[in-house]
Amino acid sequence: MPPLTKKTLSLTWQAPEYRHYEKNLGWYVTAIALGILVIGFFVIVQSDYFAAITLAVILAFVIFFAKQTPQAVDIELSGKGIRYGNVFIPYKQIKYFWVVHNENHKTVNFHTNTYVNNLVIFELEGQNPDEVRDFLIQHLPEHEETRETPIQRISHKLRF
């Protein structure tokens, strides 16, 4: 990729929708065993059948989504905003950004003005994190904290 200059109009790359961890049989057995223990607690100790049914549905969703693999998405940073597949987010809807580049994560994170989904995270995949930062700093304020979010840390630990 050519070096980033003031005349660079956009950065584009392709990345998965989210970070995917391969799960082995042990991961599924552990998740199901823990789910059954918690459901059993609510049925036997608490006699709370609504909670037990709710947790069973949540467990089914976790197992279903754990098997899904992410699709590749085109990401473009331009002078006006960010295009993520068919979705466009103008810079005026973003408060600030930060780039996470460590042994576990390589992402660019955005805090938006919206109430729902106010944290947007894009995988950088093969994209140079310094180029992304240098490009975005021309359009958005950078947050001082450059660590992954608590949810990213938890999902990495749980391999989800």
Image: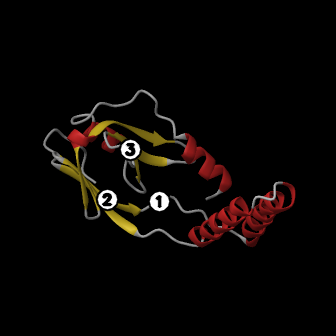
Question: Of tags 2 and 1, which is closer to the observer?
Answer: 1
| Residue name at image x 62 percent, y 47 percent | 154
Element on which disc 3 rests: loop
Mark 3 sits on what residue?
Answer: 118
Which kind of residue does numbered mark 3 sit on?
Asn
**Extreme right residue here?**
44
Q: Which quarter of the image is occupied by the C terminus? A: bottom right
Image location (x, y in percent) of residue 7 = 13, 43
Position of residue 30 in the picture relative to residue 105 (left or right): right
Which kind of residue does numbered mark 1 sit on?
Tyr
Whole-number angstrom distance, CA of label 2 to CA of label 1:
14 Å
Element on which disc 2 rests: strand
Mark 1 sits on what residue?
Answer: 18
Question: Of tags 3 and 1, which is closer to the observer?
Answer: 3
Is the residue under label 1 in contact with that under label 3 (CB below 8 Å)?
A: no
Element on which disc 1 rests: loop
Location of residue 108 with respect to 158 vertically, above or below: above
Image location (x, y in percent) of residue 109 = 40, 43
Whole-number angstrom distance, CA of label 2 to CA of label 3:
23 Å
